[in-house]
Image (cartoon, helix red, strand yellow):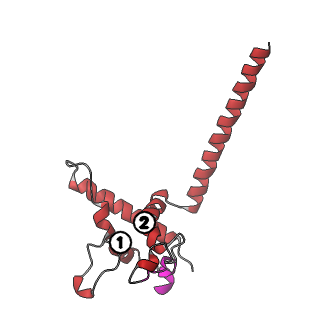
Amino acid sequence: MKTARNILTSAAGWAVACLLGLLVQFSLAVSAQENEEDPVGLTEYELACMPCHGLDGKGDGPKARSLATMPADLTQIKARNGGVFPDRAIYDMIDGRGVIPAHGKRDMPLWGDRYRKTGDEGEDPAAVDQRARELIEALVGYIKSIQQN
């Protein structure tokens, strides 16, 4: 009897743990959907931008002090543009292909080049470009989401 009771208790505990896990996952999914936060954009920000622009996008990342030009405060882009977030200009800045050399030295890396690298020699260039565009768009979306005012 004790063995059967122990098995039932263990099974009930396992079932409750599974249900709690599912509830937590559902809650996180709903929360992310409500905030319209794109985890891809956040991840790209963490990988590509955070070292220079900082955790909150204020331009105070750990590498900022070692740069010749301080990184921009990414939370003020909209405010600096009359209350309008310039999606296309930010996309182009990140991508880097539209930079005009006559306008001077570019301080920020060309992230579009990073996104277009592939480990698969036979990968379709159109698929590589599409993936790069999606990653840059996700990053632009994240930067747009951290605007203050």
Q: Is residue 82 visible?
A: no
Q: Which stretch appears magenta?
A: 70-81
Q: How packed is label 2: few (under 14 Cα within 10 Å), some, or many (20 or more)?
A: many
- Tell me which amino acid carries mark 1: Ile
Q: Residue 117: give x, y in percent of width and height.
A: 27, 58
User: Which type of secondary structure does the marked residue at label 1 adopt?
Assistant: helix
Query: Could you say where residue 47 lies in the image, as x and y percent from the top left?
Result: 43, 62
Q: At numbered mark 2, what does the secondary structure look like: helix, strand or loop?
A: helix
Q: Residue furthest front?
A: 66
The answer to whether the residue labelled 1 contacts the one labelled 2, judged by CB atoms less than 8 Å apart, is yes
Residue furthest to the left in view is 122
Q: Residues within 10 Å of mark 1 (few under 14, many from 20)?
A: many
Q: How many discs mark residues in the rendered view? A: 2
In this figure, which residue is indicated by the disc labeled 1? 94
Is 145 displayed left or right of 107 in the figure? right
Q: Residue at x 43, y 82 (%)?
A: 70
Please check the rendered image and state whether residue 80 is part of the magenta-colored stretch, yes or no: yes
Quadrant of the rendering where the C terminus is positioned: bottom right
Closer to the camera in the image, 44 or 148: 44
Image location of residue 69, percent across then percent down:
40, 84
Q: Where is residue 80? Give x, y as percent.
A: 48, 86
What amino acid does circle 2 point to?
A: Leu
